[in-house]
Image (spheres, helix red, strand yellow):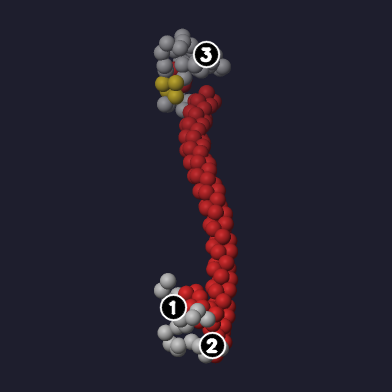
Amino acid sequence: MTDKEQIICHGVDVSKCDRLNLNSAYGWDDPDMCSIPCCNNAPNCLFKQLARVNEELQLAEQLINGILKTLNLKAYDYKADQNKILTEIKAFKQERRELEIKNVTLQNRYQQVAGATTEAARYRKALEEIEEVLKDEICEECPGEGGCKGGCKEHQCLDIINKAKGEMDE
């Protein structure tokens, strides 16, 4: 048998068949050998069956390789997507930590402002109480509404209180 020329019989290249005898006209003279006419009368001989199975296996192997390649590409895409998602999650976590720190800072400032507002309200109330006490204690030498020309301490204190309350121009 030669590799130079294919001999197709029933859709199978039988040129590599060990039992094919190209020199025999009929092939019935040797029971272990086969000629071309004999080969044409045996569509399902073992060599042809094996050749068909090998062809199917090669097709199956190509199909499987194609599927594996597709799966590998998809797995790579999923891995890339997973890495991208993990990176985004890390960024969100970092942003969340930063926002939590800002939130704590803002809460502390709010408490400071609330405390300062409360303290300012207490001082204002104290100034108003002092003002009431001083108005009751204005000295007899004061000329009245226009203020004390002699500079009594009561009017001086009332002037300081009015400045602190923002009710008097400097």
Instruction: Identify which amino acid the numbered label 2 is placed on.
Output: Cys
| Residue 24 in view of the camera | no
Residue at position x 57%, y 83% in the image: 130
In space, the residues marked 2 and 1 are separated at their CA atoms by 22 Å
Label 1, residues with CA under 10 Å away: few <14, some 14-19, many ≥20: few
Residue on which disc 1 sits:
167
Residue 53, x across and y down, in percent: 52, 30
Q: Which secondary structure, mark 1?
A: loop
Residue at position x 44%, y 24% in the image: 12
Residue on which disc 3 sits:
29
Is label 2 in contact with label 1 (beta carbons under 8 Å)? no
Residue at position x 50%, y 79% in the image: 151
Label 2, residues with CA under 10 Å away: few <14, some 14-19, many ≥20: some
In space, the residues marked 3 and 2 are separated at their CA atoms by 156 Å
Instruction: Identify which amino acid the numbered label 3 is placed on.
Output: Asp
Quadrant the C terminus occupies: bottom left
